[in-house]
Amino acid sequence: MNKLRHMSLFMSIVEAGSITAAADKLNLSKSVLSQHLKKLEAELAITLLKRTTRRQSLTPAGERFYQHCHQMHNVAEQAWNEVFELQHEPMGLITITAPHGLMNSIVVPAITNAFKPYTQVKFNLICDDAHLDLMQHNIDLAIRVGESPDSNYRQTAIGTLHDCLCQKRAIEIDLHKVSYIANHWQANNISHNINGQTYQFDVKHRTNTLMQTVALIEAGCGIGLIPDTLAYHNSQMQVIARLAQSTIYALHPYSAAIPLAVSMARHAIELKLANKQRTE
């Protein structure tokens, strides 16, 4: 028995004043609606509605049951209205993950500016260079450098960044002898083409997060690769050479309509990346 449907139809009969009027309003046949009422009363083993050919009236049990039906209807209306509101004004929690090279410099300023008028939006930000599983970590939006070829999630290219070979500002270095600080994803033997000349580097230091690489360069421990999103905004850094370009992707787990907050966040980050490229 479809309880919710029977309750909805019963409420319609009561409020319409008769089965005939309710049938016309619901575009159902009178006999179908009458059968629904009979099944409902049989299931409950009680009479809910006293009927004659000219009028109907609720029994005490019918009156109580109608009040519950009306409450159920109001709850359903509220649920639908609240979900529709989410597509007109963002609200609630949005979880975003991004690597260290993009979170503070791109993602945070982009979303804080975009959602400034919407005080009902809450952020859960996960700064991690690893490719976290969106479903496992309840992530709404992931910003990643490079495509995720094995991903089942929807991914869209939203911008680019360049790796920059950087040193501590205001110190003299010899590219043939300088210590190299490698990120965890780099090999042991590293070569870079700088101003048309190829340089070979042996790794002296290695880090497992980008921010450690930044800290070691700031301390004068050597040179290393830093994304342009950080390199050009760090007063302690000097860019030696601008190297490879990578594409930045946005991923989300939604197969149908994307929640408004997620689409707004993605658009804001894409605009921030576009503005970065125009000011370089």
Image: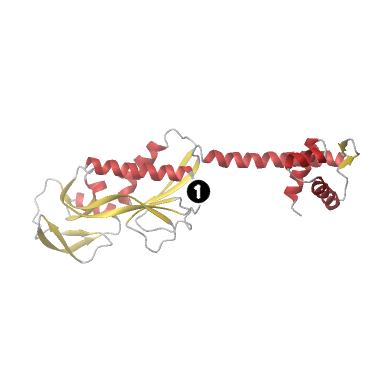
Rendered image coloring scheme:
secondary structure
Of 140 and 271, the residue lying toward us = 271
Can you give x and y, in whole percent of width and height, for residue 119 in the image? 47, 35
Residue 187: x and y, percent? 23, 66
The percent coordinates of residue 250 (x first, y second) are: 38, 51
Quarter holding residue 269 = top left
Tell me what residue is drawn at x 20 percent, y 49 percent. 218
So how many labels did they put on this image?
1
**Viewer-proximal residue among 184 and 142:** 142
Residue 131: tell me if it is visible.
yes
267 in relation to 1, above or below? above
**What residue is rendered at 39% in x and 38% in y?**
112
Look at mark 1 in the image and give the residue it sits on: 257
Residue sitting at x 46%, y 50%: 140
The kind of residue on which mark 1 rests is: Ala
Residue at screen point 45% across, 52% down:
139
Q: Quadrant of the C terminus?
A: top left
Q: Is residue 93 left or right of residue 131?
A: right
The extreme right residue here reads 52
Q: Is residue 164 above or below residue 191?
A: above
View extreme (top): residue: 117
Image coordinates of residue 75 in percent, x first then y, are: 67, 41
